[in-house]
Amino acid sequence: MTDSFELFRLRWNSSLGFEGVAPMDLPPGRTVVEETPISSQLNSISIQTRCFRCYTKITENSRKMCEQCGVHYCSTFCCSEDSKIEHKLVCPFIADKSLNFTERNDILEFRTVAYHLRTASHNWEVLNSDNTYPSISRSLGERMVPSEAEIAKFNTSSLVRKHTHNVLDLFMLMSHKGTFTSTTASELSTRTNLYLQILSRDPNSPALFYSNASLLEECMDLITKLICNNLIGDDSDGKPFILALYPRISLLNHSCRPNCGIVLDGKGRAVMKTLTAVKEGEPLTFNYTPLTDSTPRRRERLQIWFDFECHCERCTEYDSLLHRLQLGHTEELRDSALLDEACVCRCGGAAARLSTNPPVYVCLACGLKTAGEGTVALIADLTKREEQAVQLARTDPVKAVQMMLKVLQDSKQSGEDHLRLHPFHSRQFDIRCILVSLLARCGQIEACTALFGDLITTFEFLSEHRPSLDVLYFLVRLLPTVRKMKDAPLKDSLLRLHSTLFDLFYSNVPLN
């Protein structure tokens, strides 16, 4: 069985590890990887609406339920097949609500460990008999640098390359376990011990792959690789529904200005496509975090979720602009690198954030420097109220709209430092997107139209500078509302933007 179809070459980067590069000049919309996950799990919401085995959306007429743990299946067949493999083992632990097995990544971690133990009985040399994999160290904690000959061997395979997963795919991945706190490491050890207990394996027995580790240490190492490489998968409506590990896609690295994007089918198979023209030899990159966030917020999330500090082109550009500001250069902002956290000075000019602690803003028009404690407090308050409104929307969308209208009104006010948020500030963008979605749910088309008028400039700017699934998913969810708008020019602009992005991401150019 083929798990992955691939159109990329590999090279070695001393700081990033393996990185996928374009094997030739690629046009926008070209498929570069199609991959089935090696392990995955439904998130805590989708586990109520999708089949636990095949991830198909469940109808009430076809719904089957495990009587012990309560997970759902789309058919008697899926229920029966799943019980033959892992479900009978993990079922009691899902049923024990005190373990929160379905609220975190535990099922994904368990399935990854189970996959390793199920397939690791093969001879390692047999698994790599065709030299598909460059050298992987058999010593825990040692990262082996592949030779030029091994990289060349990998790259001489025909394109489009067909690949079948095996456990070596997991050991090729990088992890950042060296940055884990003692508390995190202790919690990971406890969880891994539980997984091995479920699978009736002795945690103190010798590792199956590493020559200098116990089975517990080896499985903990695999989970740290999983933590740093798993992805949240969205359905075609832009709603997250699975957590999954795609080891071949994981060979491609992150960028906050990516040249590739990923879309998923309803069962978790991922398709990665180019967003822009990519030159031969250029790294193929995609984003691990929402692109509409500010640079500090993206970096914070990447540090928390994937344990690395981003120094991609966009983040480096941000650092460079920030450094120039700190040296006194108050040039006009020409890109979004600082706009997504900018404010408006009392003179009307754009004020960029010069430093974080303490927060200081400098106006690029008049040069005035302003202490930004008031703005920081305003953003924190808006964020808290926005989160409360999103929670309220699940039960009372009308009250949530009222709350968000007040949040929007307050976002336009100046803080105690006389600064107000720039229209391109990431918080302004998020507030408007959430409010438009809530207004659409309540059928308030005219109010939606007014807000879309504010958003269209931001959408077009984002799509020009960094085509984004975030914008596409937002437009897909609201297409019925857009089509009801009476403002013909605005409606045409939104439909044209949607069509451009949709064609880019969903045009059918299969690799296989």
Image (cartoon, rainbow, N blue to C red):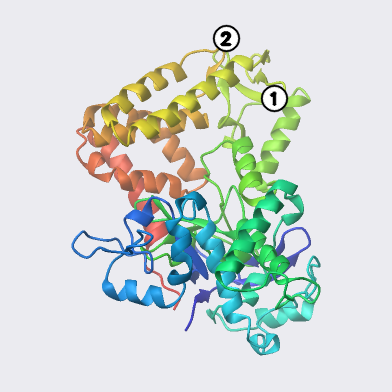
Tell me if mark 1 has few (under 14), some (14-19) or many (20+) residues whose alpha carbon lies within 10 angstroms of its own.
many
Q: Where is residue 124 in the image (x, y as percent from the top left)?
A: 69, 85
Residue closest to the eye, 463 or 92: 92
Residue at mark 2? 416
Tell me which residue sits at (38%, 56%) in the image.
Answer: 47
The reply, left or right, for residue 478 in relation to residue 255 is left
Rendered-image quadrant of the C terminus:
bottom left
Which of 264/124 is in front? 124
Contact between labelled residues 1 and 2, with CB atoms less than 8 Å apart = no
Label 1 secondary element:
strand
Q: Residue at the location (37% across, 69% down)?
A: 54
Which residue has dot 1 on it? 354
Image quadrant assignment for residue 331: top right
Q: Which amino acid type is marked by label 1?
A: Leu
419 over 246 or under it: above or below: above
| Up/down of 14 relative to 316, above or below | below
Q: Which residue is drawn at 60% across and 76% down?
A: 117
Amino acid type, mark 2: Glu
Q: Which of marks 2 and 1 is nearer the N terminus?
A: 1
Answer left or right for 252 relative to 78: right
- Residue 241: which disc? none
The x, y position of residue 510, in whole percent, is 41, 73
Q: Quick check: 498 left or right of 481?
A: right
Q: Where is residue 60 in the image (x, y as percent from the top left)?
A: 21, 59
Relative to 195, is 496 on the left or the right? left
Residue at left 23%, top 44%? 480
Q: Position of residue 503 (x, y in %)?
A: 37, 58
Q: What is the distance, in whole Å, between disc 2 and disc 1 at their CAs?
A: 18 Å
SS under mark 2: loop
Q: Is residue 138 visible?
A: yes
Q: Nearer the viewer, residue 70 or 341?
A: 70
- Is 14 above or below relative to 473? below
